[in-house]
Amino acid sequence: MTRSDAPQPPALARAGIDRSAEEREQPDLVDSLRADPATRVVAVHGDRGLVSTSGPHLHTVGVADVSGDVEWAFLGRDDAGFAMLLAVSGPDAEPPVVVPDGAEWAALRAVGGELDPVAAALLVEAVSLGRWLVDAPFCPACGARTRTRAAGWARHCPSCGREHFPRTDPAVIVAVQSADGERLLLGKNALWAGRNMYSTFAGFVEAGESLESAITREIHEESGVVVAASSYRGSQAWPYPRSLMLGFHATCTPDSVVRADGVEIVDARWFDRAELAEALAGRSTDGVALPGTASIAYRLIVDWVESAP
Ligand SMILES: [Zn+2]
């Protein structure tokens, strides 16, 4: 596959702030930064961040704006060296801040592709860490309530002494083209009932499995086709709920037969570049919708449309 330009990174992996991980071991780092009026806060409510309604731009707040029962963590430092903290509450709890004028809550998956690269990376870091802080307060070994440490990046169990860290689940996501390179195979997920949406195939890497084996297995299970070759494209975190999406382009064998599994994938069909270009522009004649710009699936599909067979 050839491309006219250097490949674009996935939307949530275009940049990153300095996570300044060496600072996390300073005792009481979060408390001291909460006392510093220069500190900025990324407020997160479930998978949503605060964005400007005129943007979207990521809307940070001051420490004093945060109220209620929230978890705090240190996200890193911005270009000017200012500390960035996370203040997070779960989706069923009160939001960590009252929405300021000119801002609104917006889901990472909805706005991540429209935010500037640094803001998108900051929000995916904040939502990913925040989900773990909110969802995993208890020790998986003994069930005791843990205490956060390392500025929110680890939990210590006072009962059994174990340390716990945010968990990431690897998942492969694969754009499969025909043997001649002229068509791309996409599937309609059962979860999208009622929507005419098609996307690339994806699945979790199982215990003891290589990425290459996961690709072969998932693609065959979901679509029936046999992968002949694959190449790694790039990755991004996807905190729904805690995935690391590993993106690949693949080509199937010439004699592959498409057969959707009928359970997870209710339909699988081929698209040519012209059809997908129309769908990406929102002009699909048969009403096909494609994944949003924040997703790595979007990046894989755009790659393929822009590539020469
Ligand atoms: Zn324990």
Image: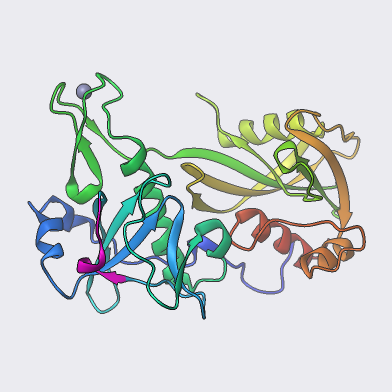
Nearer to us in this view, 136 or 6: 136
At a point 55% along the width and 65% down the height, the residue shown is 111
Left or right of 22: which side holds 4?
right
* Ligand 1 location (quadrant): top left
Residue 108 is a magenta residue: no
Instruction: Please tell me whether residue 290 is drawn above or below residue 260 in the rendered image.
Output: below
Left or right of 126: which side holds 232?
right
**Residue furthest top in the image:** 142
Nearer to us in this view, 205 or 40: 40
Residue 63 is a magenta residue: yes
Q: Quadrant of the C terminus?
A: bottom right
Nearer to us in this view, 51 or 202: 51
**Disc count in the image?**
0
Instruction: Please tell me whether residue 169 is drawn above or below residue 11 in the rendered image.
Output: above
Left or right of 135: which side holds 148?
left
Left or right of 67: which side holds 45?
right
At a point 25% along the width and 46% down the height, the residue shown is 153
Instruction: Please tell me whether residue 154 is drawn above or below residue 273 in the rendered image.
Output: above
Q: Residue 185 location in percent, x, y?
A: 82, 47
The magenta span reads 61-68
